[in-house]
Amino acid sequence: MKPYKTYYAILALILVILILLSGVISFLSVNETAAIQKGLGVSANRYSSLLMHCITVISLIALFILHRKSKHRAKLITVAEQLHNIINHSGDAIISTNFDLTIISWNKGAEQLFRYPDTKAIGKNLATLINSEITGVLRHEIWTELKKNNYWKHVSTFSTPNNKNITALFSISTIRDINKKNKIIGFTCICTDMTFQKNAEEKISQLATMVEASNDAIVTFNDKLEILSWNKGAERLYGYKSSESIGKLMPELLSHQDSTLFLKATIKNLTSKGYWKSEDIHYNKNGEKINVLISFSSFNKTNNNIYLGIITDITEQKEVEQKLLQFNKTLEEKVLEKTAEMREIFDRVDWGFSAFNINGDFIFVNPKAEELMQVQAKELIGKHIWKAFPNAGEDFRTTYSTAIKTQKTQYLETYASSLSKWLACFFFASTNGVSIYFRDITERKKLQQERIDINTQLRTLAAHQEKIREEERKKMAGELHDELGQLITSIKIDAEWLNKRINENDIELKKKTQDIIEISSETAIKIRDLAKALRPRILDDLGLIPALEWLFLDFKKRSQINIEFHHSIDDIHVNEETSTHVFRIVQESLTNIAKHANADKVTCDITTHKNNLYLFLNDNGKGFDIKAKTNTFGLLGMKERVKLINGTININSVINAGTEITLEIPL
């Protein structure tokens, strides 16, 4: 404002001079005035009038100019106040300093970004407040660039007072004194928080890396089935490069089917369900046939829908399926005469293979199956499937029953909790029994689970499937308990009948049939125990508390670990889903204790308070590092079950001091 003040002073000086001049003239002698009038060539009256007019006009002009300048100054002040408000309430941090980096102004955005109020920041040196490379290693580079271009821009990371790292875009410009040959007298710094954008870019990059690294073909396409993206897995599967595929129609490039029919069927399913899954036959670039499993889903429900396609090569599985169909047929026709020969064949197969008679008893287990199931064949032969594996999932039980009922091949991917493995299973049924061909797909499932975690819709679907599996497990447990005992009894009766008709001199065969009778008796007992462990009827008939009492007694009997169960209520009235999940969580906890804890005492307390169920399970075992075990399947399974019933779970463990599990479940 200095130029305006100077201008006002000059105008005031001129007015004073004019007033003084008028006064001087009024005091001049008559002769002096006449001489001036004569010199100017005007009369006395005109001379006085002219002089007064000049003074008046000049005064009015001066007053007008002063008025205009005053209004202009008021506008400037208003604009300055508005600019100050804009800067102060900006979401970005806007800071001004003098030449020595002493802070002059510090807006609200700076307070939020750097966590310092303006009362503490103003007057401080900027380098002492911002712990960043711009006040350190880049300081010389910044100064050089500012002297050259008056501006410098860079993305940098700094630490806030609470040690939180924030990535921001720093824009620094110089402030120059125009009265001193543009000398730099200070700096303006604008900082924009880029942390969210950086994190988003990193997540996008991670997702893109996962998609590209996937062994499955992952493609995206629009409503017209025009390919929009094509990953490396798709290139390996079909032989087409990304540049050859993008823009092409899905059915034309991948399938032998009629494009129009394929388009209508796909769009119809995607529109009505948002998801479509089926098996199909495709052809690669060389014309070779590929059996594939296709999963399509909609992930952008706008006017221009975008669809995600995950295509898995199941050619090997289909080939194995055909082989196993032939194997199963041969086994059914000549099981007695060709046992040794079939054993040799299946011993060479790299998949686990188990055969069951019509009663559900093991009659064959190959070495790979022994490895996968972690049990020797001699311990399984003659034993009922549900007695051997009482914790088999409901989905496994349902698929097994479906194969028997429909006499058609069934495929299932299931998690065997007792083995801590995901298994891909083919069920081949006939009138004489069932054959199951399976392999470990745990690693593949881990990758699939990572993709599910990224997509919330798939997470919801997984929760729903878990509920269905539990319902099917319950149903299959009942069928197992009612049917398998009769089947084992039939085997025993047939073996006794055969034993009576064998010649007494045939000692070896006589002994073999007697062994079958004894194994059948033992198997019948173990099958009943297995059915209880898989889905104890007491849980459905009597409720949660009696079921837990049975579980603890059975655990103590099997593990020889002392267990104390305390409860202040006879039973808890909860729905079936909650009872099942609580039971399974306790069951999984006991399994972990038996396998890993090396404990000799377990305590369980259960009570209710304010319409909530509380369960405390403690052991005096060796404990474990909770951070290192966070992502184990057992712990994740328990956490997911708790989420399904809107509860919470807290797991605390100290090395050499045992483990404590706390459940809080709303009733």
Image (tube, rainbow, N blue to C red):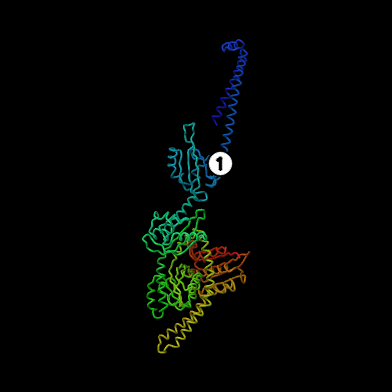
Residue farthest toward the left in the current orientation of the protein: 286
- Residue 523 shows in this picture: yes
Q: Nearer the viewer, residue 404 or 189?
A: 404
Question: Is residue 170 rendered to the left or right of residue 579?
Answer: left
Seen in the picture, residue 365 relative to 169 is either above or below; the reply is below
Residue 131 x/y as whole percent = 48, 47
Q: Kindly tell me whether residue 555 is visible in this rendering.
A: no
Figure check: 484 above or below 6: below
Q: Position of residue 39 (x, y in %)?
A: 56, 11
How many residues crowd around disc 1 within 10 Å: few (fewer than 14), some, or many (20 or more)? few
Q: Position of residue 19 (x, y in %)?
A: 61, 20
Judge by depth and name the residue closer to the eye, 2 or 216: 216
Q: Work out which quarter of the rendered image holds the N terminus and state it.
A: top right
Which residue matches tag 1?
86
Quarter of the rendering occupied by the C terminus: bottom right
- Picture quadrant where residue 574 is located: bottom right
Q: Residue 550, image x and y in percent?
A: 56, 74
Vertical order, 625 against 362 (above or below)? above
Location of residue 74 by image quarter = top right
What is the total number of numbered labels drawn onto the structure image? 1
Q: In terms of depth relative to the viewer, which is nearer, 280 or 42?
A: 280
**Amino acid type, callout 1:** Ile
Which residue is at a point 47% across and 34% down the rendered structure image? 183
